[in-house]
């Protein structure tokens, strides 16, 4: 199975400051159709996960533009330009290129 | 508005069975692959099973293969997960999700396997 490794696992951030989460895969996530099926999810405390970004950099409808995704091949990043209180939670990357689809361990973001 | 509502979770003894259900609304259920994803206590997320829009293809994680069966009833906008031979390590919140990229999630249903 493809192993997804996130860092850091814990991310304390000051309100208004930027935050960045890294996700590395054990194999390239480029699919035969040329797409890279790398997703980012946010799970707020006590809530279900919510998809933020699909195919590396495409924000879902309603996701604030302070969230952005980038990367290629095996290295990906989720950036939050200015952290707000509602961003507290756990963030997961997930690969949808190789069966079985696998998630990273999660990065817990909280406010300093 | 897309909605997914799971039900059927509960406490069951090891070796027992449960059937989870998920009803979808706000989208054309029969157009989409559907998935079950679980969240182990205090831990991360794990894909369990998925099923093609017409029910003609089903995939399972190795950890549940031979014990769990995914199915759907498109006229009822419903997805199911029959779980047999349950083990303590199946204890988790089970989420119903749209597609293989999990674009939308239900609120989850808790399954606890314990004697």
Image (tube, helix red, strand yellow):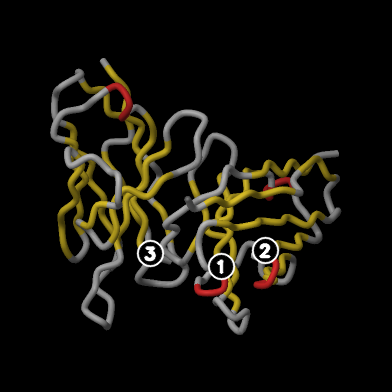
For label 3, the residue is: A2
Chain of residue at mark 3? A
Residue A21: x percent and y percent? Answer: 23, 41
Q: Do callouts 1 and 2 point to residues on the same chain?
A: yes
Distance in Å between CA atoms under marks 1 and 2: 8 Å
Name which residue lies at 64% across and 65% down. B77
A96 sits to left or right of A17:
right
Q: Are marks 1 and 2 in contact (CB under 8 Å)?
A: yes
Name which residue lies at 33% across and 51% down. A93
- How crowded is the residue under tag 2: few (<14 C-alpha within 10 Å), some, or many (20+)? many
Name which residue lies at 19% across and 18% down. A14
**Secondary structure beneath label 3:** loop
Residue A83 badge: none
For label 2, the residue is: B78
A39 is higher (above) or lower (below) than B56: above
Quarter of the picture holding the N terminus of chain A = bottom left
For label 1, the residue is: B29
B43 is higher (above) or lower (below) than B86: above
Residue reaching furthest top?
A: A112
- Displayed quadrant of residue A87: top left
């Amino acid at each position: 199975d493809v192993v997804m490794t996130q860092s850091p696992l814990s991310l304390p951030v000051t309100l208004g400051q930027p935050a960045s989460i890294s996700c590395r895969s054990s194999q390239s996530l480029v699919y035969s159709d040329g797409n890279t099926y790398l997703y980012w999810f946010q799970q707020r405390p006590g809530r279900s996960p919510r998809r933020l970004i699909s195919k590396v950099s495409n924000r879902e409808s309603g996701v604030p533009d302070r969230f952005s995704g980038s990367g290629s091949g095996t290295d990906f990043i989720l950036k939050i330009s200015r952290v707000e209180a509602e961003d507290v939670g756990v963030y997961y990357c997930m690969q949808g290129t190789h069966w079985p689809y696998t998630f990273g361990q999660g990065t817990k973001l909280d406010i300093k | 508005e897309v909605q997914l509502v799971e039900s059927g979770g509960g406490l069951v003894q090891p070796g027992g069975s449960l059937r989870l259900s998920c009803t979808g609304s706000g989208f054309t259920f029969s157009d989409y692959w559907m998935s079950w994803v679980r969240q182990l206590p205090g831990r991360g997320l794990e894909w369990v099973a998925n099923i093609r829009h017409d029910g003609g293809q089903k995939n399972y994680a190795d950890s549940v293969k031979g014990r769990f069966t995914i199915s759907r009833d498109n006229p009822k906008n419903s997805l199911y997960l029959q779980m047999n031979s349950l083990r303590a390590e199946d204890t988790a919140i089970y989420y119903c999700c749209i597609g293989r990229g999990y674009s939308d999630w239900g609120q989850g249903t808790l399954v606890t396997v314990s004697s």
